[in-house]
Image (tube, rainbow, N blue to C red):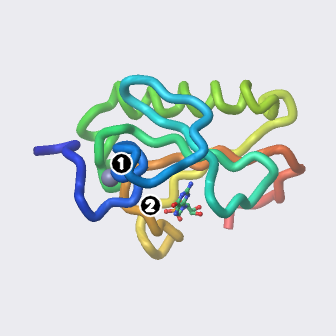
Amino acid sequence: MSGEPQSDCLFCKIVAGEIPATVVRQNERTVAFRDISPQAPTHVLVIPRAHYPNAAALAAAEPALAAELLVEAGEVAADEKIDGAGYRLIFNTGAGAGQTVFHAHVHVLGGTPMREGLV
Ligand code: 5GP
Ligand code: ZN
């Protein structure tokens, strides 16, 4: 069924507590945790507990949950005190765009001046 946990998915294992993560926020539907290989002073991933392979699939299946991911990303930015200076949200989609974990997630990046440009 759509959204069901996948046994071979790293982020489903983090949701299940089978792999440890530094969780900074969570609720019944989402989890936010620090990226294991931070690319900026603040680098947090916000994921739905439900498994969808990417942001578009999540939004198509559960638009309210996709919106909640953005609300939580904003709360992470406020908690990390990077909302004033500005921060970047990234949804890599597809291997060619750098997606390596095929469970929808948004990167929250900030705490340093961000490079201009998108690619
Ligand atoms: P993607 O490249 O798919 O957009 O992002 C996946 C992110 O997951 C990468 O930034 C990578 O550093 C992070 N990551 C991979 N494995 C782990 C892990 O075991 N724990 C945590 N916290 N982050 C991970
Ligand atoms: Zn998953």
Task: Give the residue type at disc 1.
Answer: Ala
* Mark 1 residue CB less than 8 A from any atom of ligand 1: no
Classify the position of the C terminus by image quarter. bottom right
Coordinates of residue 37 in the picture (x, y in percent): 66, 63
Classify mark 2: helix, strand or loop: loop
Residue 25 versus residue 55 in the image, above or below: above
Q: Looking at the rendered structure, which numbered label has been put on residue 93? A: 2
Residue 38, located in which quarter of the rendered image?
A: bottom right
| 92 horizontally vs 51: left or right | right
Looking at the rendering, the quadrant in which ligand 1 lies is: bottom right
Q: Nearer the viewer, residue 33 or 16?
A: 16
| 49 horizontally vs 37: left or right | left
- The residue sitting at the bottom extreme is 96
Q: Looking at the rendered structure, which numbered label has been put on residue 65? A: none
| 92 horizontally vs 80: left or right | left
Task: Give the residue type at disc 2.
Answer: Thr
Mark 1 surroundings within 10 Å by alpha-carbon count, few (fewer than 14), some (14 through 19), many (20 or more): some
Which residue does the image show at 62% across and 54% down from the upper left?
Answer: 35
Pointers 2 and 1 in contact (C-beta within 8 Å): yes
